[in-house]
Image (cartoon, rainbow, N blue to C red):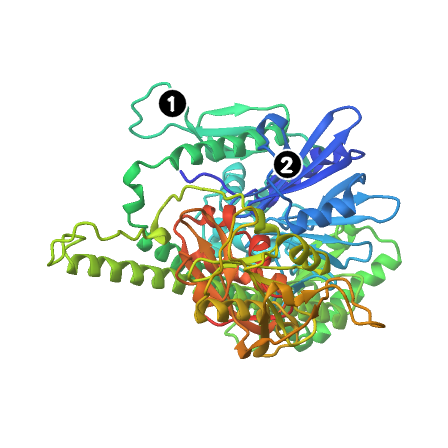
Amino acid sequence: MDQKRELSSIDLGALVTELNRYAGAKVDKAYLYDDDLLRLKLRDFDRGRVELMIEVGEVKRAHVADPENVADAPGRPPNFAKMLRNRMSGADFAGVEQYEFDRILTFEFEREDENTTLVAELFGQGNVAALDETGEVVGALQTVRLKSRTVAPGSQYEYPASRLNPLDVSLGGFKRNMRESDSDVVRTLATQLNLGGLYAEEVCTRAGVEKETPIDEVTDDQLRALHDALERIGERLRSGDVDPRVYEEELDGESDEDRDPRVVDVTPFPLSEHEGLPSVGFDSFNAAVDEYFHRLEGEETDAGEAPADASASRPDFEEEIAKQERIIEQQKGAIEGFEEQAEAERERAELLYARYDLVDEVLSTVQEAREDEVPWDEIAETLDAGAERGIPAAEAVVDVDGGEGTVTVELDAEGDDGGTTRIELDASAGVEVNADRLYQEAKRIEGKKEGAMEAIESTRKELEAVKERKAEWEAKEAADDGDGNGADDEDGDEDEEYETDWLSRSSIPIRSPDDWFERFRWFRTSTGYLVIGGRNADQNEELVKKYMGKHDRFFHTQAHGGPVTLLKAAGPSESADPVDFSEETLREAAQFAVSYSSDWKDGRGAGDAYMVEPDQVSKTPESGEYIEKGSFVIRGDRTYFEDVPCRVAVGVQCEPVTRAIGGPPSAIVDRAATSVTLEPGMYAQNDAAMMVYRELKERFADTSFVRKVASADQLQEFLPPGGSDIVD
C-alpha cells in the first residue's frame, strides 16, 4: 500500500478545529528548511512552546509538532524567513480557516502595527504566500503566473477556482451532480464531488452502495444513503468528534521481528476501508498527524542509507515516465469531464428557455403558494395531485425540497428522441435567473478547464525532462560499453583520473565550506585565482581598505554603479609575490565586474571595464571635489576591456566541496557538476533564481542534495541585480 504523503481536504477540515485551539499564541521566529518546510515557533501562555509546521514540497502537511520531533534550526535564514520574522515577530496567532473544500489553509496573525495572512497551498506544486491587510502578496515561496491566477509580490492574492464542497451540498444538489456523470458511483464521488479515491470508497462502504454501480442504474434511495453518509462525516468534522488513527503495514518478507511496521495512513476517524490494517489511536488528530509524518520521515531516512556502490545504480526512468504519462491521461480525462460538464450546464439553461412556458408555470405556482404561506409539504401534495390529473406543469415536477427552497423538474429535450433532463430550480426566482445561474456555472467549470490545461502542459515538460535524462544516461552507458567500461587504454595507463557522474548519484555527501570571502560576491577564475566584488557601498569600502593587496588588480566598469572587483594574488593572511596574470584570467575578472554592474540592470548585452594597480586607487579627492561612499579616485593609466559580454553561469559544485557557485561561464561550467547560463532579460531576480533552482534540481537524481546546497535563495546571491533570461 502506498504511503500517504499529502493531507486531504477532509484531513484539513479536522485539523482546523484543533489548530484554532492555539489562538492567542505569540510568534517567536520563522525558519525555512529546504525551501519547502516552514516552521513557526510560537509561545502559548498555557502550553509553552508551540511548533507550527507547514510543508509544501513532495510531502504536504500542516500541524503543530512535538518539539522533540522538530529538527535543529537551519543556518542563515533565507529571504522568505527573514521577511516573516520582520512582519510576524511578536504577532498573535488569531486563527486558521480552510478555504472552501480545497487543500488551502489561511492562517491569520495580528500585530499592533500590521497584520499578516499566511496562505498555505497544500496541493499541486505547493506554496506559502504572505499577505498584508489588503490581501496583497508580500512574499511567496514560489511565484505563480498563470492565465487563471497570479501569486506574485505586489499583486492581489488570487485563490484557485472554487470547488464543490461535498460535505455541505444539499440532497438536491448532490443528486444533480451525481446524475450528470456518465461514470460509476465511486469515480463520480472521487472526481466530480472532489472526495478523492479513499474517501469516495469509504462513503460507498458506509452507505452500502456497490462502488462500481453505473450512475444510470443508481436509485434515489441509494443516492440518499450516500448523501447521508457524507452528512455524517461532515457533522463529525464540524463538531470535532474525532477518533484519530495512524494505520500501519507489516513489511513483506521482513526477517527482523523487532523491525517496526511502516506507517501508511493517518485519518481523523477509523475507516472501514482500512479495517484489515493495524492502527494506533491518538487523543487528537493533530498528534496523530505529527506522529505519522515524523515516522514517515524517519523511515525514508533509513531507506535512504544506500550501500557504498549505490551511486552506480540506474534511476528508474521507466517508472517515472509511466507515472508522468498516467498523470497526463488523468488530466486529459479531467479536461474532457470539464468540457462535458460545461456543455451540459449550457444545454440545461437552453432547455429552460425552450420549455419557458411550462417552467414559468411551475415556478409561478410555487411562488403564489408560498406568498399565501402554504407549507412546502402541501405544495408537494398539490403538485402530485395535479400530476395524477395529467396537468403538464405538475407532471414535470419530480422533487420539492422545502429546506433548500428548490423544485426539481424533468424536461423533455426537444429533438432528443424522448430523452429527459433533470434541473433543480430556485423556486423563489424566475426562469431567466435560473437559466443565468446555469450559464454562470458553465463559465466556472470552463475556468477549471483552463487550469487543468496549464497543469497538463507543466506535466508534459516534466515528462520531456525525464526522457532527456534517460537518453543522456543511456548515451553514457553506451559510451562506457564502447571504451571497455573504464578498462586500460592502449598505452596501458591505469592512472587516468575518473570523473564522477554526480548527476546520477542517488546520494551525494554534503561537504560544506566555510570561506571568509563568501559574504562578498566571488568566483574562482579558470586558472584558480580568487575574484571578489562588493555587494554595496560598505563592502566596496571594506574591500579596498582591508582586503586589497599590493599585487592584486582592481577592476571597475565604465558605467556608473558597478562593484569594486579585486583579482587576488593571494589570500588576506598570505604573503604574495608579483603575479603575471594570464589574459584569460584578466578577461574573466572584467566580465565579472561588468555582469554585476548597472550594465546588466539596464539590459545591455555588453559593457566596458578597466583595470589598475592598487596604488592607483585612492580615497583622496581633488581639491574642492567630493567622493561618495564606496567610490574611489583612480589616477594614472588604465587597461581597458571593451565590449565584454554580460553573461553569468550559476551551478552546483560537488567537489572538493558542495555549494552553489556563480560567475563568468568560462570559469564556472567546468568547475560545476552542472550549470545554467543567463543573460540580461525579463525575469526578476527572485523569479530567475527559482527558475534556475528548478532546472538544476531536475538534473540531479538526488534532488534533496540541491535543496540543501543550492536553494533558490543561495542561487539568487550569484545572480546580477535586474532582470535575467536563461540562455541554456
Residue at disc 1, secondary structure:
loop
Amino acid type, mark 1:
Arg
Q: Quadrant of the N terminus?
A: top left
Q: What residue is pinned by disc 1?
A: 259
Q: Is residue 110 left or right of residue 362?
A: right
State the image coordinates of residue 347 (x, y, percent, origin top left): 60, 73
**Is residue 105 visible in this depiction of the protein?**
no
Q: Measured along the vertical axis of the image, is residue 334 above or below residue 110?
A: below
Q: Secondary structure at mark 2?
A: strand
Would you call the spot at circle 2 few (<14 residues within 10 Å), some (14-19), or many (20 or more)? many
Q: CA distance from mark 2 to mark 1?
A: 27 Å
Quarter of the rendering containing residue 611: bottom right
Q: Which mark identifies residue 308?
A: none
Q: Position of residue 37 (x, y in %)?
A: 59, 43
| Disc 2 + disc 1, Cβ < 8 Å | no
- Up the image or down, 546 lies above or below 609; here it is above
Q: Which residue is mark 2?
A: 63
Residue 718 visible from this viewpoint: yes
Relative horizontal placement of residue 239, taking residue 467 as reference (left or right): right
